[in-house]
């Protein structure tokens, strides 16, 4: 009697400083009764490797609490899943990039909770790549998809809680959203400065360095290049069997040095995904000055350099991508066709990035009322 019945959206990467999971922590919390757990893409345990690999429902191993997958038969809770709850708690790690689907799942939950008149409480977590730098093109409405539900740039610079507050306003959702703030985080602090343990939020982001590079190197998912899936350092290594590393390196290295990165030639052999069991020539990116890294600018430079060196081999990946079977994956990732058309036209990547500055300035103004942390 007197206990609030709550649901929880999380996965097993949500731990405290003592490495205790959120489910276990809430199960012992007085005044709350955790009755349902919702999990995002990759499964609650984070074991599913790739896009469009679904998870089923089940039960939490340690507590027996029902576990509902929101990346399986549904991607949004139906009314029956929310029935009997007094609130939905959201505790999700994010990596600061629009296409990372965890916050898309959170937004779909906000929509469902708006219809059910159910309040949402976000247990906030820092943006691991910082809350000051924003980069890349803005999502255009005609490119809305599961990897782009909210009009933010590719690198959005919001915490999980701030993202939910911004999404509520941007999408006009009538839902109560409360945020339990992080203590001690400032916008300029990258993940290593938080003192928190890095728990891979999903299988292909095993390191902070990969997450720092992800906002730009995720663009390679929309191309004929390997983004390093099937290796131990995805999004840090990249290439292809046909890559002329000497030519590409000469084009790239000076540009990346200005972005806080060093380029090191290497070879790798993916165990799955693109070029499975084939030796790829390519590079590893080293963020030697993490605060200066501009990952989207780096990703643009990579696309430009490879297409310049290999106009006959570089290609855009064909659909499907995250359940969209018609539009080019690169357009869904970028949130616009401007990036693809610019690379095809041979536009200098720095010029492409400059073309988005006006929209980014407008975004910075629009997000200002939702910021919870100081610089």
Image (cartoon, helix red, strand yellow):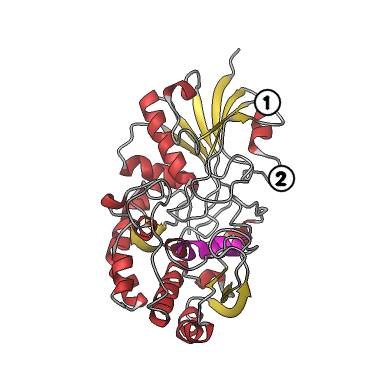
Q: Residue at x 61, y 29 (%)?
A: 58
| Picture mark count | 2
Chief SS of the magenta region: helix
Q: Residues within 10 Å of mark 1 (few under 14, many from 20)?
A: few
Residue 23 lies in quadrant: top right
Tell me the number on the disc at residue 64: 1
Q: CA distance from mark 1 to mark 2?
A: 20 Å
Q: Say which of marks 1 and 2 sits in front.
A: 1
Q: Would residue 61 appear left or right of 238 to someone viewing this image?
A: right
Q: Residue at x 32, y 48 (%)?
A: 144
- Secondary element under disc 2, as helix, strand or loop, is loop
Q: Would residue 118 appear left or right of 65 to someone viewing this image?
A: left
Note whether 96 is above or below 16 in the view shown: below
Please state the horizontal and vertical placement of residue 24, each as a whole percent of the image. 69, 33
Note whether 184 is above or below 304 in the view shown: above
Q: Nearer the viewer, residue 309 or 111?
A: 309
Q: Is residue 356 visible?
A: no
Q: Is residue 211 magenta?
A: yes
Please state the horizontal and vertical placement of residue 204, each as a whole percent of the image. 59, 56
Q: Nearer the viewer, residue 27 or 237?
A: 237
- Residue position for label 2: 19
Q: Residue at x 59, y 18 (%)?
A: 3
Please state the horizontal and vertical placement of residue 236, each as a whole percent of the image. 57, 68
Q: Residues within 10 Å of mark 2 (few under 14, many from 20)?
A: few
Please state the horizontal and vertical placement of residue 338, each as a whole percent of the image. 29, 65
Range of residues picked out in magenta: 207-218
Screen quadrant of the N terminus: top right
- Secondary element under disc 1, as helix, strand or loop, is loop
Q: Is residue 202 visible?
A: yes
Give the mark nearer the N terminus: 1 vs 2: 2
Q: Residue at x 43, y 65 (%)?
A: 223
């Amino acid at each position: 009697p007197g206990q609030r019945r709550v649901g929880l959206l999380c996965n097993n990467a949500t731990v405290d400083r003592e490495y205790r999971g959120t489910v276990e922590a809430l199960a012992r919390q007085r005044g709350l009764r955790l009755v349902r757990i919702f999990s995002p893409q990759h499964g609650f345990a984070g074991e599913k490797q790739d896009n469009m690999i679904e998870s089923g429902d089940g039960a939490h191993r340690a507590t027996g609490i029902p576990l509902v997958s929101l990346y399986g038969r549904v991607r949004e809770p139906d009314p029956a899943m929310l029935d009997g709850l007094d609130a939905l708690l959201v505790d999700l790690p994010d990596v600061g990039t629009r296409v990372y689907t965890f916050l898309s799942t959170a937004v779909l939950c906000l929509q469902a909770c708006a219809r059910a008149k159910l309040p949402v409480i976000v247990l906030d977590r820092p943006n691991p790549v910082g809350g000051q730098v924003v980069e890349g093109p803005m999502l255009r409405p005609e490119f809305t998809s599961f990897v782009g539900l909210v009009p933010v740039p590719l690198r959005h610079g919001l915490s999980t809680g701030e993202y939910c507050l911004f999404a509520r306003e941007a999408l006009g959702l009538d839902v109560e959203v409360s945020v339990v703030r992080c203590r001690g985080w400032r916008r300029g602090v990258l993940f290593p400065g938080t003192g928190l343990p890095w728990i891979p939020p999903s299988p292909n982001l095993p390191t902070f360095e990969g997450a720092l590079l992800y906002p730009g190197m995720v663009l390679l998912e929309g191309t004929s290049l390997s983004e390093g899936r099937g290796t131990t350092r995805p999004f840090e290594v990249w290439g292809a069997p046909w890559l002329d590393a000497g030519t590409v390196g000469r084009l790239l290295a000076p540009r990346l040095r200005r972005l806080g990165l060093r380029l090191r030639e290497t070879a790798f052999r993916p165990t799955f995904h693109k070029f499975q069991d084939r030796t790829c020539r390519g590079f590893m990116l080293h963020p030697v000055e993490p605060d200066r890294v501009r990952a989207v600018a780096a990703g643009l430079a990579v696309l430009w350099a490879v297409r310049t060196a290999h106009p006959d081999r570089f290609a855009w990946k064909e659909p499907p991508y995250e359940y969209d079977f018609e539009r080019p994956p690169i357009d869904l990732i970028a949130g616009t066709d401007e990036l693809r058309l610019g690379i095809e036209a041979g536009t200098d990547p720095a010029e492409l990035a400059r073309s988005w500055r006006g929209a980014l300035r407008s975004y910075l103004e629009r997000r200002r009322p939702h910021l919870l942390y100081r610089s």
